[in-house]
Image: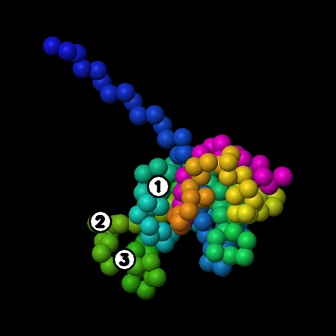
Amino acid sequence: MPRLRPPAPTPPDPATGHWLMKSEPDEFSIDDLERRGTEAWSGVRNYQARNYMRDAMRVGDRVLFYHSSCAEPGVVGLARIASPPRADPTQFDPASAYHDPKSTPGAPRWVLVDVAFERRLRRPVGLREIRRHAAKLAGLALLSPGNRLSVMPVLPAHFDLIVALEDA
């Protein structure tokens, strides 16, 4: 009888531990995060972004804070994930723009994590500048056509390159 080998361990996902999180500065900016120190990242209503927050984010993970839907979108600061995921209370609030009538406290659909301010970049690294480095940033979800996710994984090397651009 042939001997069965245990399955090989799944290698760690190299993208976990580093994230890009988008926010419209008119709604919540790096200034707001700096002023508050830590903020619950509520209102995410995309299943893939939710899955990243629920299944892959860990306390201490690093975040590129990105301003979107503005004159010059780009990375403006750094933050860290400061809490494990938990139910987003806005889904249960009928007065909230993020209310989900199909979600219940016993079976919530949406989660949030707390995000803690780390620092501002010395200068913003705009999307145009990031695109100029597309060859070195191959696979970066931000550069994928049609990608509108507000939460996305970033490879450590991509994270480091984008941060290094603040001094370019």
Across and down, in percent, residue 158 comes to: 65, 47
C-beta proximity under 8 Å, tags 2 and 3: no
- Image coordinates of residue 20 in percent, x first then y, are 60, 57
> What residue is disc 3 on?
100
Q: Marks 1 and 2, how far apart in space?
A: 18 Å
Task: Describe the element under mark 2 as helix, strand or loop.
Answer: loop
Q: Residues within 10 Å of mark 3 (few under 14, many from 20)?
A: some
Which residue is denoted by mark 1 in the rendering? 52
From the image, give the main secondary structure of the stretch colored magenta.
Answer: helix
Residue 105 x/y as whole percent: 32, 69
Q: Where is residue 114 shown, x and y percent of the image?
A: 55, 61
Q: Is residue 28 above or below residue 137?
A: below
Q: Secondary structure at mark 3?
A: loop
Q: CA distance from mark 2 to mark 3?
A: 12 Å
In front of the other: 119 or 166: 166
Mark 1 or 2: the one toward you: 1
Residue tagged 2: 107
Q: Quadrant of residue 82?
A: bottom right
- Going by the numbered disc 1, the residue's amino acid type is Tyr
Q: Residue at x 32, y 72 (%)?
A: 103
Sequence-first disc among 1 and 3 = 1
Amino acid type, residue under disc 2 in the picture:
Ala
Q: Most extreme residue toward the top, as rendered?
A: 1
Q: Height in image: 65 above or below 133? A: below
Q: Secondary structure at mark 1?
A: helix
The structure residue drawn at horizontal position 57% and vertical position 49%, both measured from the top left corner, is 139
Quadrant containing the N terminus is top left
* Front-most of residues 7 and 78: 7
- In this view, the residue in front, 130 or 55, is 130
**Which region is colored magenta?**
150-168
Query: What whole-number distance in Å separates the C-alpha atoms at marks 1 and 3?
Result: 19 Å
Q: Magenta segment: does it hold 54?
A: no
